[in-house]
């Protein structure tokens, strides 16, 4: 697993040996950031289910102003910190949070914290996407985009917040991406 673009391009990250943790593939990350390339510079980016931290580190590498790495697993938090140290990300504007996705989004809404991009990639077999969706708009900036990664195409029927809509869907190997933003 390596960073595919930006100032940390080519750096190899540590991975998991743990069952159930599936990092976003290099191909899916590269494709995602090719789509976001001109919008990521100066953006606030939330990697809600960070795992290894690869997606958030890719955002840092490509010029995000601020990145929040969030995961509910202590092992993931250790790995994210190890990967940030491995790329020598000192001086970068990032934070690492140990929290479940719903709690993090609820806290962001209360504090008024908003993000230009929220990447949502929980374990594929979990029900976590449907749990975080009702809390998404409280942490998404007015022109923000949420990206959901899943093993199957995103079922738009679970998007019950009528102020949001899916504007694009893509598939990269095993990964299906859905892009969500506010209705104007």
Image (spheres, grey):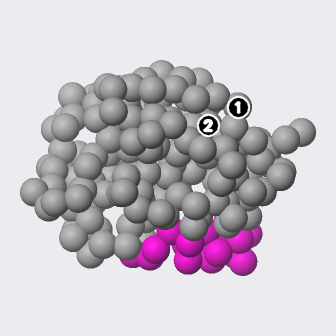
Tell me the quarter of the image containing the C terminus: top right
166 is higher (above) or lower (below) than 105: above
154 is higher (above) or lower (below) than 110: above
Q: Residue at x 32, y 52 (%)?
A: 53
Numbered tag placed on residue 167 in the rendering: 1
Tell me the quarter of the image containing the N terminus: top left
Numbered tag placed on residue 179 in the rendering: 2
Counting other residues with Cα less than 10 Å from the Cα at mark 2, is it few (<14), some (14-19), or many (20 or more)? some
Q: Position of residue 177 (x, y in %)?
A: 50, 35
Q: Position of residue 72 (x, y in %)?
A: 37, 73
Q: Residue at x 24, y 56 (%)?
A: 21
Q: Residue at x 83, y 51 (%)?
A: 163
Q: Is residue 120 left or right of residue 79?
A: right
Q: Is residue 96 left or right of residue 165?
A: left
Mark 1 lies on a secondary structure that is strand
Mark 2 lies on a secondary structure that is strand
Inspect the magenta stretch and tell me whether residue 51 lies in it.
no
Instruction: Give the image quarter of residue 156.
Output: top right
Inspect the magenta stretch and tell me whether residue 102 lies in it.
yes
Q: Position of residue 63 (x, y in %)?
A: 48, 36
Front residue (pair 149, 114): 149
Q: Which residues are magenta?
A: 98-113
Separation of marks 1 and 2 at Cα, in angstroms: 6 Å
Tell whether label 2 touches label 1 (CB within 8 Å). Answer: yes
Q: Position of residue 145 (x, y in %)?
A: 65, 42
């Amino acid at each position: 697993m390596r960073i595919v673009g930006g100032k940390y391009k080519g750096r190899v990250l540590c991975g998991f040996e743990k069952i159930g943790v599936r990092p976003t593939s290099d191909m899916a990350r590269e494709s995602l950031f090719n789509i976001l390339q001109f919008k990521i510079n100066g953006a606030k980016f939330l990697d809600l289910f960070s795992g290894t931290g690869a997606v958030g580190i890719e955002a840092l590498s490509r010029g995000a102003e601020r990145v929040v790495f969030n995961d509910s697993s202590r092992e993931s938090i250790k790995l994210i910190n190890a990967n940030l140290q491995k790329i020598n990300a000192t001086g970068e504007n990032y934070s690492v949070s140990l929290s479940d996705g719903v709690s993090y989004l609820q806290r962001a809404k209360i504090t008024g914290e908003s993000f230009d991009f929220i990447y949502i990639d929980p374990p594929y077999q979990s029900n976590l996407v449907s749990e975080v969706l009702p809390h998404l708009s409280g942490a998404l900036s007015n022109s923000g985009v949420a990206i959901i990664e899943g093993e199957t195409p995103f079922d738009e029927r679970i998007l019950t917040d009528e102020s949001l809509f899916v504007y694009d869907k893509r598939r990269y190997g095993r990964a299906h991406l859905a892009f969500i933003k506010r209705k104007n």
